Amino acid sequence: MSDHKISTKVIHAGQSHEPITGAVMQPVFQTSTFAQPWPAKHTGYEYARSQNPTREALERCLAALEGGTHGICFGSGLAATNAVMQTLPANAKVVCCDDLYGGTFRLFTKIFVKAGLSFDFVDMTGADFDVAIPEGTDLVWVESPTNPLLKVVDIAAIAARCKVIGAQLAVDNTFATPIFQQPLSLGADMVVHSTTKYLNGHSDVIGGVVITADDDIGESLRFVQNSAGAVPGPWDTFLTLRGLKTLAIRMERHQSNSKQILAWLQDHDEVIKVHHPLLPSNPTYEIANRQMSGFGGMISFVLKGDLNRA
Ligand SMILES: *Cc1c(COP(=O)(O)O)cnc(C)c1O
């Protein structure tokens, strides 16, 4: 489907009719195990932690949307992030951007530090990457735009630095979605999503995915998926496939709605500051315009007064 537009891929990529009945939608393969024609001989499906056709359809679709070749789905966005960390060597050194989804920060600083990983949190907007990302770094982890401050970092420039020192680059693309930003095409090695958010889009599923175009990384993530077992269930992957079909038009509408809300907030007496990549006052406006084709609907802002006033 590589010639099709992304608005077509969200509907069809990675999916074809089911061969026995011709059902045009991927069925929910709600099974734990698969019958084997002979002991240790199977049809490609043995046990649903290892393989599930519904999950695989979602994985193929998500990989296609990000321009990757491997999609590996997990039971939540944090489980996807967890899996990336579990591919790293002992005592790995990780450099992260300073504004991060709170749960990611908690996972890194409360759980993976216990496993000997070290994390450096740096403001990567306008940073000198030769300094911010020293030799010996194993992984660089960025969100762009970030949750909640909507900071944007120069993904291509960070990727170039990572190539020089042999570090991997993972980008949490949850806020932009592949509709507006495709980090693999900017040089990232992995894209991570909380599919809970825009990708599923209906507030009824928790899920996550890691996407890569690198066979070795894909294989090690697949190994973690099966060995650590944080897999999503077939219903959740079915619902996410279903939600994805409207992603392109939802993102368009989110964006046009957010422009109106943005204008309203900027004029509001009680608002001190508005964070949005689209604002020319944003220091990374130029980078955002270069690496994103749109900005979606996320806005954050600072209010006058205290919590009660808010
Ligand atoms: C929600 C979120 C996550 C975590 O995903 P869950 O599905 O809640 O585990 C990670 N990154 C970002 C940017 C998020 O918004």
Image (tube, rainbow, N blue to C red):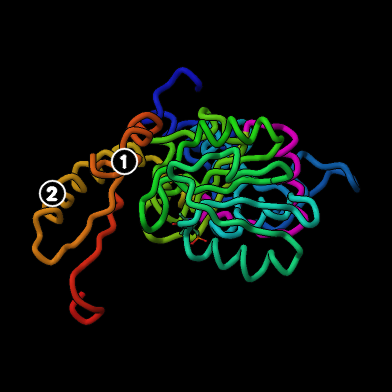
Q: Which mark is residue 263?
A: 2
Q: What secondary structure characterizes most of the magenta part? A: helix
Percent position of residue 51, x then y: 70, 47
Which quadrant holds residue 83?
A: bottom right
Label 2, secondary structure: give it.
helix
10 Å neighbourhood of mark 2: few (<14), some, or many (≥20)? few
Q: Is there any visible trace of residue 206 in the rendered image?
A: yes
Q: Identify the secondary structure beneath mark 1.
A: loop
Q: Position of residue 118 (x, y in %)?
A: 69, 59
Which residues, given as a range, are shown in magenta? 213-237
Q: Residue 232, can we see it?
A: no
Amino acid marked by disc 1: Phe
The one of 57 and 109 positioned closer to us in this rendering: 109
> Is residue 292 toward the left or the right of residue 208 in the image?
left
Q: Which mark is residue 170?
A: none
Q: Is residue 125 above or below residue 107?
A: above
Left or right of residue 285: residue 266: left
* Spot occupied by residue 214 in the image (x, y as percentages of width and height): 68, 32
At x 13%, y 49%, the residue is 263
For disc 1, the marked residue is 295
Q: Name the N-terminal-most of marks 1 and 2.
A: 2
Magenta includes 300?
no
Q: Amino acid at mark 2?
A: Ala
Q: Residue at x 61, y 59 (%)?
A: 79
For mark 1, does the 10 Å Cα neighbourhood hold few (<14), some (14 to 19), or many (20 or more) residues? many
Height in image: 206 above or below 244? below
Q: Residue at x 84, y 43 (%)?
A: 37
Whether 234 is among the magenta residues is yes
Query: Height in image: 107 above or below 61?
Result: below
Residue occupying image coordinates x 53% and y 44%? 171
